[in-house]
Image: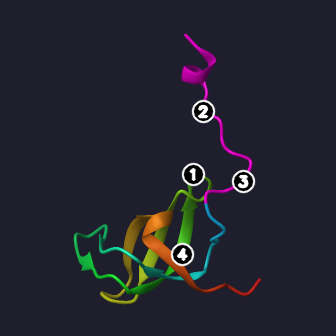
């Protein structure tokens, strides 16, 4: 068994500079956790970051409380969360 197989190394820098509570917009249509289609341009709030910024859970206002898992390449920053 190789070391590469046994361990997963994380990069020192995150995949993107987005952080919790940032407002983002979709650059690609995605499907919510409930199966609803969320269109390009829909804005939401990042509520969770996964794998050093490779993926995010974003909450959208329509339908109310809709959550979707998105990759960093599927969203763009609209407004930075205040610290």
Q: Which element carries disc 2, helix, strand or loop?
A: loop
How packed mark 3 is, by other alpha carbons closer than 10 Å (few <14, some 14-19, many 20 or more), is few
Q: Choose the circle earlier in sequence order: 4 or 3.
A: 3
Q: Quadrant of the C terminus?
A: bottom right
| Residue at (66, 42) in percent of width and height | 10
| Numbered badge on residue 8 | 2
State left or right for residue 58 relative to residue 23: left
Residue in front for this viewpoint, 34 or 46: 46
- Identify the residue under disc 1: 51
> In 3D space, how far apart are the residues under numbered discs 4 and 3 (Cα atoms)?
19 Å
Q: Choose the circle earlier in sequence order: 1 or 2.
A: 2
Query: Relative to 50, does residue 67 appear above or below in the rendering?
Result: below
Label 2 near label 3: C-beta < 8 Å? Answer: no
* Image: magenta residue range: 1-15
> In 3D space, how far apart are the residues under numbered discs 3 and 2 (Cα atoms)?
15 Å
Display colour scheme: rainbow
Label 1 near label 3: C-beta < 8 Å? Answer: no
Q: Which element carries disc 3, helix, strand or loop?
A: loop
Label 1 near label 4: C-beta < 8 Å? Answer: no
| Numbered badge on residue 13 | 3
- Identify the residue under disc 4: 46
Image location of residue 39, percent across then percent down: 29, 82
Image location of residue 76, percent across then percent down: 51, 78
> In 3D space, how far apart are the residues under numbered discs 2 and 4 (Cα atoms)?
25 Å
> In 3D space, how far apart are the residues under numbered discs 4 and 1 (Cα atoms)?
14 Å
Q: Which element carries disc 1, helix, strand or loop?
A: helix
| Residue at (67, 56) in percent of width and height | 14
Q: Choose the circle earlier in sequence order: 3 or 1.
A: 3
By secondary structure, the bulk of the magenta-drawn segment is best described as loop
Taking the view exactly as shown, the residue that stands out farthest to the right is 83
């Amino acid at each position: 068994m190789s070391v590469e197989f046994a361990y997963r190394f994380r990069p020192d820098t995150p995949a993107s500079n987005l952080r919790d509570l940032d407002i983002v917009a979709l650059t690609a249509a995605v499907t919510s956790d409930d199966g609803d289609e969320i269109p390009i341009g829909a804005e939401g709030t990042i509520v969770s970051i996964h794998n050093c910024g490779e993926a995010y859970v974003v909450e959208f206002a329509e339908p109310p409380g809709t959550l979707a898992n998105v990759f960093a390449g599927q969203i763009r920053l609209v407004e930075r969360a205040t610290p």
